[in-house]
Image (tube, rainbow, N blue to C red):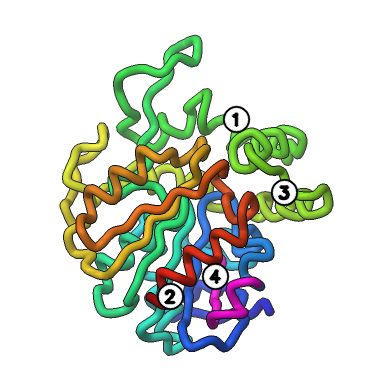
Amino acid sequence: MLKKVVLPNREEIAFRIGGNGPETLVMVHGNLVSSRHWGTLLEKLSNKFKVIALDLRGAGESSYNENVETFKDWANDIKLFCDELDLKDFNLLGWSMGGGIIQQFAVDNPNYAKKMILFGSIPPSGYPYVKKGPKGEFLDEYYDNKEELLQDPVQLKPMIDGLENKNRDFMKQLWAMSVFNIKVPEKEEFEILIDDVYKTRNLKDAAWAAHAFNISHINNGVFDGTGEIDKIKIPVLIIGGEKDLICPISMHEFTKDQIGENAVLEIIPNAGHAFHYDNEDLVVEKITNFIFE
């Protein structure tokens, strides 16, 4: 069921809610998608949990009255959202960029979530983009300003153009190659998911926010890490796809190392970035075991 709530900052946040299990699971999606991209995973999880999957500001059916600048803006939206719904002692799951956002949320709001699942997540050092040469070759330096980053000829500009120009064939090809590189959804479902991509209004801001995010202990090529990852003391499950092209296993290993002993890493075999489409039953099992253990 899709509902909406207006936050004190005047943003209207859409969310899907279902289930009445003993544990609450709040789910945060990634870049260029919305809660619709969870597919049937929401239904499967609602058999065991009370599931609440929100659309981030600027995605899906949510508003975009004020542009986001950093992950802190989205993290604050989540706090306001949880306060409006009177959510306490819940479990938090974030996919891809959403994983970075919930890391920031956990740092800023240590008494909210009791367990956290990083689901094909970007690491605590963010997702910085290296500069490209005249032939599209990757260079040994990173973009240091937003304007130059958004002109990236390989990773960003084609995506921005595909979104703004409604180049559906390009977007479908991109999704099939990167997000659904193991298993492409059935035709009708795939078309619905691409429709959902075109509801995105925050892509440019999201790219810079991910580029600049760094709560790790290293310099990510752009900014020094704040070391705030040490503030995450709750149990953390890191789930990655064995063949994820967007957030590969090396990122998850780094995340586990940065978080420390309270983190556990699980790899879904023969799965890409959308591993809930590749092996939904195993994903449900991993989530359920972690939350109820």
Where is mark 3, residue-wise? 194
SS state under label 3:
helix
Q: Quadrant of residue 86?
A: bottom left
Q: Residue at x 18, y 40 (%)?
A: 218
Residue 212 drawn at (x, y percent) = 32, 44
Please, what is the three-letter code of the amino acid marked with disc 4? Leu
Q: Nearer the viewer, residue 56 or 149?
A: 56
Horizontal side, residue 73 vs residue 180: left or right: left
Is 102 colored magenta in this rendering? no
Q: Earlier in the sequence, mark 3 or mark 1?
A: 1
- Disc 1 or disc 2, which is closer to the eye? 1
Q: Residue at x 35, y 37 (%)?
A: 250
- Disc 2 or disc 3, which is closer to the eye? 3
- Disc 4 or disc 1, which is closer to the eye? 4
Where is mark 1, residue-wise? 158
Where is mark 4, residue-wise? 54
Where is mark 2, residue-wise? 9
